[in-house]
Image (tube, grey):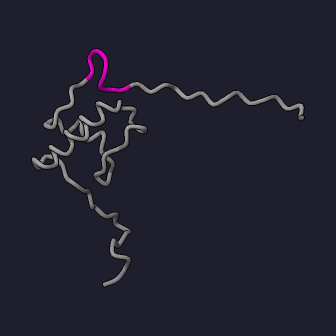
């Protein structure tokens, strides 16, 4: 055995759902500003392990995002290409 002191274990803060508790915002398909925070740059729904949304509220959130997309308030995909990127692999 070595004489090195053992490292303290990595402390991970317990994440709390932003949609539960007093004063929490309601999930509504018409609130595109709120829904946009849970969508990636490419238009994908961000998983709950990253956003800390509870399982029940994640399902509600996904339904609201899908309904907003269907109603035309949000895009299905965001294909804005960077200025330096061709997008087709350089073929013509």
Q: Position of residue 55 (x, y in %)?
A: 34, 33
- Residue at the top extreme of this rendering: 22
Asked if residue 78 lies in the magenta stretch, the reply is no
Q: Is 91 left, or right, of 72 in this rendering?
A: right
Identify the main secondary structure in magenta.
loop
Q: Is 59 left, or right, of 12 in this rendering?
A: left
Asked if residue 20 lies in the magenta stretch, the reply is yes
For residue 42, what is the image quadrant? bottom left
Residue at the location (29% across, 26% down)? 19
- Residue at the left extreme of this rendering: 71
For the image shown, how many numbered marks are present on the structure?
A: 0
Q: Is 2 left, or right, of 89 in this rendering?
A: right
Residue at the location (30% across, 39% down)? 37
Residue at the location (82% across, 28% down)? 5
Residue at the location (19% across, 39% down)? 64
Q: Position of residue 41 (x, y in %)?
A: 32, 51
Chain part drawn in magenta: 17-24
Can you say which quadrant of the picture contains the C terminus? bottom left
**81 or 69, nearer to the observer:** 69
For residue 85, what is the image quadrant? bottom left
Q: Position of residue 12 (x, y in %)?
A: 55, 29
Q: Is residue 42 above or below residue 35?
A: below
Q: Is residue 45 above or below residue 58?
A: below
Can you say which quadrant of the picture contains the N terminus? top right
């Amino acid at each position: 055995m070595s004489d090195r002191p053992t490292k303290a274990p990595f402390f991970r803060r317990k994440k709390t759902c932003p949609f539960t508790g007093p004063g929490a915002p309601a999930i509504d398909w018409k609130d595109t500003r709120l829904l946009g925070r849970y969508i990636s740059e490419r238009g994908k729904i961000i998983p709950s392990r990253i956003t800390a949304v509870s399982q029940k509220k994640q399902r509600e959130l996904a339904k609201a995002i899908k309904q907003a997309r269907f109603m035309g308030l949000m895009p299905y995909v965001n294909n804005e290409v960077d200025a330096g990127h061709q997008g087709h692999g350089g073929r013509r």
